[in-house]
Image (spheres, rainbow, N blue to C red):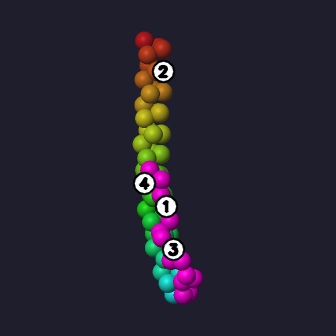
Amino acid sequence: MPFYPPFMPPYPPSPEDELRMLEDYKRELEAELRDLEEELRSVEARIEELRKALGREGKG
């Protein structure tokens, strides 16, 4: 699912507003990164399960 950065107003934000928006965006990216890392661990675990199953199959 694609992620789009938060809507930026057509006028230049104040430094305070820009800081707040960037901090919010950073938190969203960090949450997405955690989700991706969890998914990667799940995929790696499944790969390992399949490799072990194929290894036993070949020896049996």
The secondary element bearing badge 3 is classed as: loop
Compared with 19, 42 (above or below) is above
* Residue 12 appears anywhere in the view: yes
The amino acid on which the numbered mark 2 sits, given as a three-letter code, is: Gly
Among the two numbered marks 4 and 3 on one chain, the one whose residue lies closer to the N terminus = 3
The residue under the point 43% across, 62% down is 31
Image depth: mark 4 or mark 1 in front: 1
The secondary element bearing badge 1 is classed as: loop
The secondary element bearing badge 2 is classed as: helix
Give the image location of residue 44, x and y in percent. Answer: 48, 39
Q: Residues within 10 Å of mark 1 (few under 14, many from 20)?
A: few
Where is mark 1, residue-wise? 4
* Mark 1 to mark 2 CA distance (whole Å): 43 Å
Image depth: mark 4 or mark 2 in front: 4
Image depth: mark 4 or mark 3 in front: 3
The amino acid on which the numbered mark 1 sits, given as a three-letter code, is: Tyr
Give the residues in magenta.
1-15
Compared with 30, 14 (above or below) is below
The amino acid on which the numbered mark 4 sits, given as a three-letter code, is: Asp
Where is mark 3, residue-wise? 8
Q: How crowded is mark 2: few (under 14 residues within 10 Å), some or many (20 or more)?
A: few
Where is mark 4, residue-wise? 35
